[in-house]
Image (cartoon, helix red, strand yellow):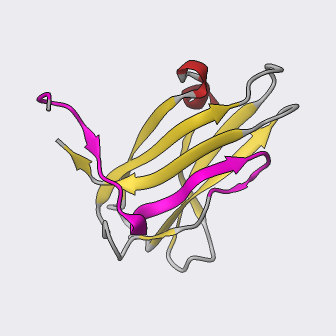
Amino acid sequence: MKQNARQMVLDAEQLFGEAETLTSTGVIGSSINLKGGLGLGSGTIVLIITALDIATGDETYDIDIEVSTDNATWVKWGSISDAEIQALTAGDGRVLKPFHNQGSEMYNYVRLNATLAGTTPSITLTAFLSETMI
């Protein structure tokens, strides 16, 4: 393995969704309990995008990272922008977004909420939370 190469470790308890195909706005898979698996720390949100429809040129893909203390009331923590997603060559690649749960409030859950727009939006992806391995 090359030095400085980053590997992302997938734990089933930290999987938002696997091979999810979205054609409209909604939550990607399910929420992750931060008290199990990774714990109340930090890691990387990994999106592996295997298909992306940009045929008509007006499709947009924005993904909000949301956190919750009770798995019912959600607060936007951050986002993955349409520009970050569409920058991938031919809709095939990875988006890595650092995530940390260290601040004035510790959250118990995290989820991804996608907003899709345009004529024929469609995205297929696998999303998970990983500890970054060096």
Q: Residue furthest bottom?
A: 70
Left or right: residue 76 versus residue 35 is right
The residues colored magenta run 2-28
Q: Is residue 122 magenta?
A: no
Q: Residue at x 88, y 31 (%)?
A: 119
Q: Hey, which quadrant is residue 12 in on the image?
A: bottom left
Q: Looking at the picture, how far across and down is residue 14, in whole percent? A: 41, 63
Left or right: residue 102 versus residue 46 is left
Q: Looking at the picture, how far across and down is residue 95, in whole percent? A: 47, 36
Instruction: Report if residue 105 is visible in the image.
Output: no
Q: Residue at x 60, y 20 (%)?
A: 90
Q: Quadrant of the N terminus?
A: top left
Q: Looking at the picture, how far across and down is residue 36, in whole percent? A: 35, 76
Q: Hey, which quadrant is residue 117 in on the image?
A: top right
| Number of marks drawn | 0
Q: Residue at x 29, y 63 (%)?
A: 41
Q: Is residue 16 magenta?
A: yes
Image: 49 above or below 34: above
* 105 or 63: nearer the viewer: 63
Q: Looking at the picture, how far across and down is residue 11, in whole percent? A: 35, 62
Image: 76 above or below 118: below
Q: Residue furthest right?
A: 119
Q: Quadrant of the C terminus?
A: top left
* 83 or 23: nearer the viewer: 23
Q: Hey, which quadrant is residue 106 in on the image?
A: bottom left
Instruction: Report if residue 27 is visible in the image.
Output: yes
